């Protein structure tokens, strides 16, 4: 956004929880149009002061607790940030904008609100909500509040519901960076259940370009699904990563696959997610820019070249948390 829209001033507000890291922002921190504010979206006083100090004209709301396994262990933080935090932001933006034209509140959400698919079909924008995990329930709830503000107060919202992201800087609790990190360190690769669950993977930069497109060109009051038409079973994906890394790490063919370990399934594990992105493609002319194999190759290289980053974010409490969780499976 900063390089594409040099006349925008971007206020990046983040609570910097375990998955946040200011080092991810070194490329932009010196930009004259960029401000970082450390704050919790549940803190009404602080958020109001940020709206006033920076005269916020639009919001792109990505703040969320996002990891399904953590939501199963403890749902309340998900309710706080994802539901209460969202309603707080909505309320403050509504009071600040006072019904004036020209503002946008873009709520970034997930395809998990639609539940789980069988072998056939795709999630469409009209698919009924059927969230099944505490995480997806909290996101579904936040989507409902965002829509309620549109219908009740004519508040200018847009929603995007995206499939699984992958790419650089992703916290290594998510499948792809977790597996890369474990392969590099020759640690077990924990596959939940039989590994037959399916996810639809999209390069994070393509998600970012979809947000840019929806924010600028999408219709007020509308939701847009974003996805890569790129379905993989977890086991095929992990085996593919093993093969790429056999090669890149100079290991024998098949060596990394020996690390695969089937572990207890995730409770309530959604079977399949797959997005029908035809609305954003046809209406807004957006489509993913990268083939998955190319994106994955770039991503693996990024993690190999940034081992310091991985060491830093996995040190301390995260590694204890992860090792304990893995032992319990
Ligand atoms: O679909 C969009 C969603 O994708 C986002 O809304 C979520 O914030 C994001 O976390 C992601 O949710 P998933 O639960 O699909 O992602 P995760 O990387 O945790 O898991 C992907 C699949 O891999 C899932 O079927 C569970 C499985 N898995 C995951 C981990 C971490 C394993 O088999 N082993 C693992 O160690």
Image (cartoon, rainbow, N blue to C red):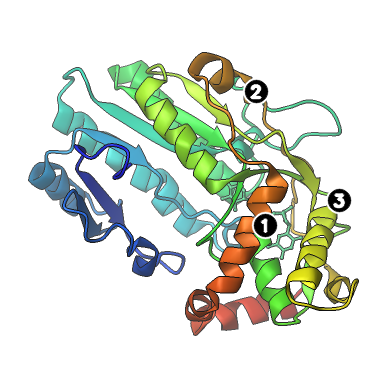
Mark 1: give few (<14), some (14-19) or many (20+) Cα within 10 Å.
Answer: some
Q: Is residue 135 above or below residue 225?
A: below
Cα distance, mark 2 to mark 3?
A: 23 Å
Cα distance, mark 2 to mark 1?
A: 29 Å
Specify which label sits upstream in the sequence, 2 or 3: 2
Res. 195 image quadrant: bottom right
Q: Which residue is mark 2?
A: 124
Specify which label sits upstream in the sequence, 3 or 1: 3
**Disc marking residue 297:** 1
Q: Is residue 280 above or below residue 45?
A: above
Percent position (x, y) of residue 47? 20, 49
Percent position (x, y) of residue 286? 53, 25
Cα distance, mark 3 to mark 1?
A: 23 Å
Q: Which residue is mark 3?
A: 196
Dot 1 lies on which element? helix
Quarter occupied by the C terminus: bottom right
Quarter occupied by the N terminus: top left
């Amino acid at each position: 956004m900063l390089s594409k829209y040099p006349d925008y001033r971007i206020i990046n507000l983040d609570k910097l929880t375990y998955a946040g890291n200011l080092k991810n922002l070194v490329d932009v921190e010196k930009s004259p149009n960029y401000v970082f504010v450390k704050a919790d979206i549940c803190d009404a006083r602080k958020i109001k002061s940020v709206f006033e100090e920076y005269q916020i004209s639009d919001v792109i709301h990505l703040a969320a607790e996002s990891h399904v396994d953590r939501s199963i262990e403890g749902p309340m933080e998900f309710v706080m940030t994802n539901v209460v935090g969202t309603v707080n932001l909505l309320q403050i933006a509504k009071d600040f904008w006072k019904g004036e034209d020209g503002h946008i509140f873009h709520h970034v959400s997930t395809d998990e609100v639609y539940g789980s698919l069988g072998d056939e079909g795709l999630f469409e924008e009209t698919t009924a909500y059927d969230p099944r995990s505490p995480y997806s329930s909290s996101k579904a709830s936040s989507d409902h509040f965002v829509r309620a503000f549109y219908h009740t107060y004519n508040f200018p919202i847009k929603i995007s519901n995206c499939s699984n992201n992958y790419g650089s800087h992703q916290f290594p609790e998510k499948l792809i960076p977790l597996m890369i990190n474990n392969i590099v360190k020759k640690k077990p690769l924990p596959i939940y259940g039989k590994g037959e669950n399916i996810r639809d993977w999209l390069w994070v930069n393509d998600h970012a370009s979809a947000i840019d497109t929806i924010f600028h060109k999408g219709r007020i009051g509308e939701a847009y699904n974003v996805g890569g038409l790129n379905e993989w079973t977890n086991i095929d994906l992990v085996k593919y990563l093993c093969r790429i890394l056999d090669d890149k790490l100079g290991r024998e063919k098949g060596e990394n696959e020996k690390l695969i370990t089937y572990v207890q399934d995730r409770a309530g594990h959604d079977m399949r997610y797959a997005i029908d992105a035809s609305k954003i493609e046809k209406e807004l002319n957006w489509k993913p820019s990268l083939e998955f194999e190319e994106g994955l190759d770039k991503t693996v290289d990024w993690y190999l070249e940034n081992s310091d980053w991985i060491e830093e974010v996995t040190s301390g409490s995260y590694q204890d948390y992860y090792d304990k969780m893995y032992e319990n499976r």
